[in-house]
Structures are given as structure tokens and as C-alpha cells.
Image (cartoon, rainbow, N blue to C red):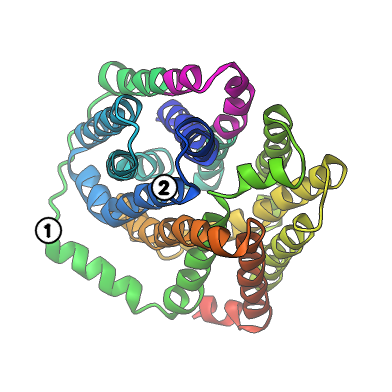
Amino acid sequence: MLAILFITEFARGAFFLSFLPLYTVKYLGLSITAAGFAVSAHYFTETASKTAAGWHFDRTGRPVLLIGLITSLASLLAMKLWPLPAILVVASALFGLGMSPVWLGVMSEVAPVQMPDRVNRIGLVFAAWLTGAGTGLVAVNFILHRGFELAFSLIIILWLVSVALTLFILPSRCRCKKQTSQGITHSLARLAANPAVTRILIPGMFLQTFSAGLLLPVLPLFVQSQLGLSYGQYGLLLLAGGGTAVLGLLPMGMVVGRLTLNCLLAAGFGLSALCLALFTTSHGPQSAFPLAVLLGLSYAVILPTWNTLLARVIPPERQATGWGVFATIEGLGAAIGPALGSLVARYAGITAPIMLATVVLLLVALFYSFYPVEKLFAK
């Protein structure tokens, strides 16, 4: 399960976070808006189908995962064979539909809520997820100088490997629990009735992925035009930030519980806002690399805190469904952000989405600095 998560996130991170914006603008000669809407379509359909995907995975297991991966493979082939704007958007949407059950299935199988050592297992899941997405995002930049066609073909081959793992290696488990739409409705009602969910988790989940989504279509172009970084240097920049995030997860996970939730959330979001603000004033790798390290550190602060909060409200009897609900909320931000970011960049300049993301993160940091998070979760 962890290998499948790593490979799929590697391929997706390479494709949507680095390859597609450059491929669309520099190879196909299309506008950045086409890339932005394709990325948004991907995250929108993944978001919209998360809860249903989790519910079906709770019932049937491997078949749902296999069908999803084959759907995503077909979408990659369609984009390679027919690279038209409409095809890019529609196929990216299908890619998101196919990707929706992967993370939910891995989390519910590897780190079930009732398991005593689930904190360590969750660390493995997030390490596989972050390492996969981060290394894919980085590695493709070292291949792009050899050509876009080669990079695209390697991404497709990796996806074939994930399909093979699912088909021939992953054991099929029969899910005997019967779930109905009424059960899903009851779970949603339980979550909606929890003030910790509506006042703390939902705003934070949406806004952090929204702010990240604003950056997706413009960041590769920004580092080339303003920072003057090559493909390889951009890969190293991403490696510095992502590597810091992964390495910081374990020590920061130990800190959670010793410091207040308000302190951790405010520090993480505040440091993210500061780093992005300083990025807009940078003009070279000398200042960009330290900022990338600090940005990765801020993510290492935020992620274990969110993980702790989410685990407190996930229904044990419907884990994939519960994770799907929260992933849907997070995905809304990731779906809306790239489209808006590309439009803002087109009409206000390439640094404007970064400045907008900075303001959003700063407001989130201020909110969690003063809102009584601890009291609400103590109820």
C-alpha cells in the first residue's frame, strides 16, 4: 500500500506540480490559463469524489483502487496523444477521479484509527505521500532538459507500475461491513455537529490548500523569470523545501502534545506567510534556498498538528469515508486555487498570486493565535 502511494504521488507530483505548467506554455504554446484550469479540474474531481470513493473502498477494497488507477492511466494517455486545451482539462478531471481512492485506502489500511501505534504508522503514510510527491516534483526537473516527450513517457511508465502492483501484488480483501447512504449521512451529521470541525478544521483545511493552489500554476515560471533558476536548480530548491518537511515530521510529531495547539498552528501558518512574502522580494538562489528550507519547516509544524486534530473526530467504523470527507474539504481549496491563481497572474502579474497566498496564510495565523482551540477540543 505504501509503495502504491509513493509511486502514484511521485507521478502525480511530477505531472501536475512541475511538468504540466511548463509543458503547456513552453512546449504546446498555450496560455498559462489552460494549465491552471487543468490543475483545478484535476483537484476538483478528486475532491468531489473523495467521500464516495472512501465509502466504496470501505465496502470492496482493491477493485475500487484498481479501477481508479486504470482511469488515471487512460487520462494520461489521452493528454499525450491529443494535447488540446479541452482534452487537457477533461483528462485532468478524469485523472483526479481515478486518484481519489488511493490516499484514503492507504490511510485506512495502514493506520486504522483504533490501532495503538497509529501515530507511527501515520508518520509512514505521510512520509510516503510527501516523499513521493516531493521527489516526483523535483526529479522531473532534472529530466526536462532531455525533452518533454521523455518526461511524459516516464510518468506514464511509473503509472503502469502502480497498476501492476495493485493488480498482481496487493491482496484483495473482502469487506463484510454493510454501509448505507443513511450511514454516510449520519457520519456527516456527526462531523457537522462538532464545533471543533466547523470552527477550526474546516477553515484551516480549506485555506491552507487554497493558498498552496494559488501557487501551483505560477511557481515554476516565477522561479525562472524572477529568481533566474534553471530546471535543475528549481529541482534542488524543491528538494530543499520538501526534504526539510519530511525530515521535520518526526521531531515535530514529538512536539505535538507538549505545546499548545494555538501555538503550533499560529507558528506554522505565520512562518509560511513570512517565507512567501520574502520570496516575492528575492532575486537569486542565495536567498531562495534558505526560504525554501524555512517553508518546509513550517509545513512540518502544521501537518502533525492537523493529523492529531483530524484523528480525534474520524469515525472508527468508517475510516476511509471519514478521511474522504476531510479530504473533500481540503481538495476544494486545491481545486479553486490554481484557476484563480492563473487568472490573477494573467491580469496582475506573476507575483500577485504569491502575495495573495501570503495574505491568506497571515489571516489564518492571526485567527489561530487568538481563537481558543484548546478549549474547544477539550469539550
Q: Is residue 222 visible?
A: yes
Residue 353 is drawn in which quadrant? bottom right
What residue is pinned by disc 2?
34
Query: Residue sitting at 80 percent across and 46 percent down?
Result: 288
Nearer to the camera, 315 or 87: 87
Q: Which residue does the image show at 41% across and 47% down from the upper left? A: 34
Q: Amino acid at mark 1?
A: Thr
Extreme-front residue of the structure: 29
Quadrant (top left/top right/bottom left/bottom right) for the N terminus: top left
Tell me the quarter of the picture where residue 233 sits: top right
Mark 2 or mark 1, whichever is nearer to me:
2
Q: Mark 1 and mark 2 in contact (Cβ < 8 Å)?
A: no
> Crowdedness of circle 2 by 10 Å Cα count: few (<14), some, many (20+)?
many
Q: For this view, does 224 lie left or right of residue 106?
A: right
Look at mark 1 in the image and give the residue it sits on.
Answer: 180
Percent position (x, y) of residue 352?
63, 63
Residue 336 placement (x, y as % from top left): 42, 61
Q: Earlier in the sequence, mark 2 or mark 1?
A: 2
Say if 149 sits above or below 274 in the image.
above
Q: Is residue 142 magenta?
A: yes
Instruction: Report whether 281 appears left or right of 200.
Output: right
Q: Which residues are magenta?
A: 135-155
Q: Residue at x 54, y 49 (%)?
A: 216
On the image, the x and y values in percent for residue 271 come to 74, 62
Residue 248 in sight: no
Q: Main secondary structure of the magenta part?
A: helix
Q: Residues within 10 Å of mark 1 (few under 14, many from 20)?
A: few
Q: Residue 131 shows which numbered tag?
A: none
Q: Is residue 27 magenta?
A: no
> Taking 307 as reference, is 194 left or right?
left
